[in-house]
Amino acid sequence: MAECGRKALSLLEAARSRYESLQISDDVFGESGDDSSDNPFYSTSGDSDSDNCIAEVGEEEQPLHHHQKQCDKESRHIGGAGGGITGGSGAGPPGSLSRKQAEEEGWTESLQDVTVPSYKETYGPAQKMSATATALDFFQLFVPDNCIQNMVTQTNMYAKKFQERFGSDEGWRPVTAQEMKAFLGFVTSTSVHRCESVLSIWSSGFFSNRSIALKMSQSRFEKILKYFHIVAFRPSQGSNQGLYKIQPFLDSLQQSFSCTFRPSQTQVLHEPLIDEDPVFITTCTERELRKRKKRKFSLWVRQCTSTGFICQISVHLKEGQGTDGLATLKNKPQLHSLVAKQLCQNISGKNTIIFTGPSITSLSLFSEFSKQDIYCCGLLSTRKSDCTGLPQSMLVCGSTPAQRGQSRVMMKGSMSLIGWYNKGHFRFLTNAYSPTKQGIIIKRKSGEIPCPLAVEAFAAHLSYICKYDDKYSKYFIFHKPNKTWQQVFWLTISIAINNAYILYKMSDAYAVKRYSRAQFGERLVRELLDLDDCSPTQ
């Protein structure tokens, strides 16, 4: 028994050491808890464009260990008994190359070392915050006073126009900046106190909160909610854009993300959990799930894998004729390629390493990025990925049984196509990690599983992002508006609060107060409401 304990401890120490070598910082979150490491690209909606993944059956994993991901449901199918790691003779996916074509295109099993140049940026907060900085100070790095004042102006303009058309509203008076902050605070409190409806604050039920309900009457809150706007009227130019009511705020938020934080060299492109809180999903009934309206938009992010900070967002409507609509690109490979290019337009020339899911991974995109000094490591799926230009022999399974940890690699220039077996077949495309270097996946029960370094790096960085998703869900605003632009607004506010907490954890202010994530959220709510006692509940 003692021997088993020492072995488990040594594996844990080895995992932590390798995490440090891959520049992953577990200290930013600062809190223990369950994580969703089984799903690096998970989303709870049935129509989500994210790359759903499932974990290995029967494997108990430590939070700090490298997680081997069984991504894409087809992996279960192709990973059955009898499948070999060597190339098969069956027909490959559309656009893939026969053995002869692959040789003519320069694909070879002769491997050469690949080195990524040093990162040309220093990562971390772009400005120093004082030790006395408050939660509101960090939040207003992203939603400053002038942004809130614009909400006040646009809301009052919309209320005036609305009443001119439909009749006066005797209960209405122009909203002030202080009231608008309180309005944001009330809605944000739904994430802190985990209540489904913001109106529960004024109720007599379980989610009532008299400590903040006295700051504003329910009727006044409902009036502001009725007329709340970011852009009151359709602009004369670009009027066909479905996101016009939220676009100025998204532009401002994006600029603030870029100005306040410099990400690490390793970043990931993905669609984060945004539909529901995981706890709600596991406790609600099937009928309640069916009643939920499906999102009419998709949101992708570029995210720092060392801290969880979301550096850039890209929002698109799922229906629409404008440039922000996905109708013309739906179910086509260029959709995710377009999203990836938008998310990476500001990082060229910095030697950034980008991790991607199957829907983004493609040879043409990675080759285009390499010309911009952007290096990539992506999971490949024969069903979801654009496999154009890749050897068929690497994409189909042969008849020779494969052993766990067995791998095969082919190269074209600096690009490596990796096939790796671990209770299923996994394929990776990368020019960010040398195919000649080996790594390991560490399991609590299985011990060390050999793999190419690219596989280890992908598993490590993506499992860390899963931990971020669980922490981020603590700031998920539960308010469920019907209008799409408002859904986008409150989602991005949730992201802004989470980014604010990450900056707080990396500042001198954290050394003074050391607020937990929940305490930081509660403090922010009280500061937005301008309550005298801003100390969080212990």
Image: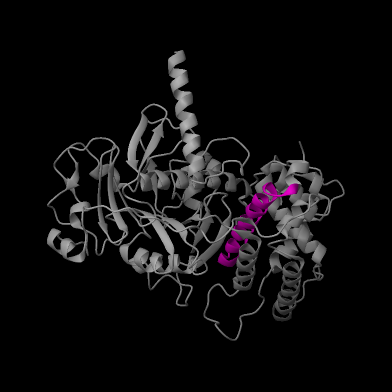
* Vertical placement of residue 323 versus 275, above or below: below
Question: What residue is rendered at 41% in x and 52% in y?
Answer: 46
Q: What percent of the width, then of the height, locates residue 335? A: 39, 67
Q: Is residue 98 visible?
A: yes
**Residue 357 at x, y = what percent?**
39, 54
Residue 449 in magenta? no
Which residue extends farthest bottom?
Answer: 236
Quadrant of the image occupied by residue 67: top left
Residue with the most extreme top position: 1
**With 259 as the anchor, is 88 left or right in this view?**
left
Q: Nearer the viewer, residue 124 or 143?
A: 124
Nearer-the-camera pick, 415 or 177: 415
Instruction: Return the residue nearer the eye: 192 or 123.
Output: 123
Reply above or below: 246 against 18.
Answer: below
Residue 163 is left or right of residue 479, and the answer is right
In percent of width and height, residue 477 lies at 63, 52
> Left or right: where does residue 219 sit relative to residue 486?
right
What is the x, y in percent for residue 208? Answer: 74, 44
- Classified by dominant secondary structure, the portion drawn in magenta counts as helix
Q: Residue at x 73, y 41 (%)?
A: 514
Q: Which residue corresponds to the image point at 28% horizontal and 55% vertical from the top-left?
A: 383
- Protein image colouring: one colour
Whether residue 482 is visible to the viewer of this picture, yes or no, is no
- Extreme-right residue of the structure: 532
Tally of numbered discs: 0
Identified at 60% across, 86% down, the residue is 236
Q: Which residues are magenta?
A: 481-508
> Is the N terminus in the top left, top right, bottom left or bottom right quadrant?
top left
- 498 falls in the magenta region: yes
Please tell me which residue lies in front, 435 or 90: 435
Question: Residue 260, relative to residue 419: is it above or below?
Answer: below
Q: Quadrant of the C terminus?
A: top right
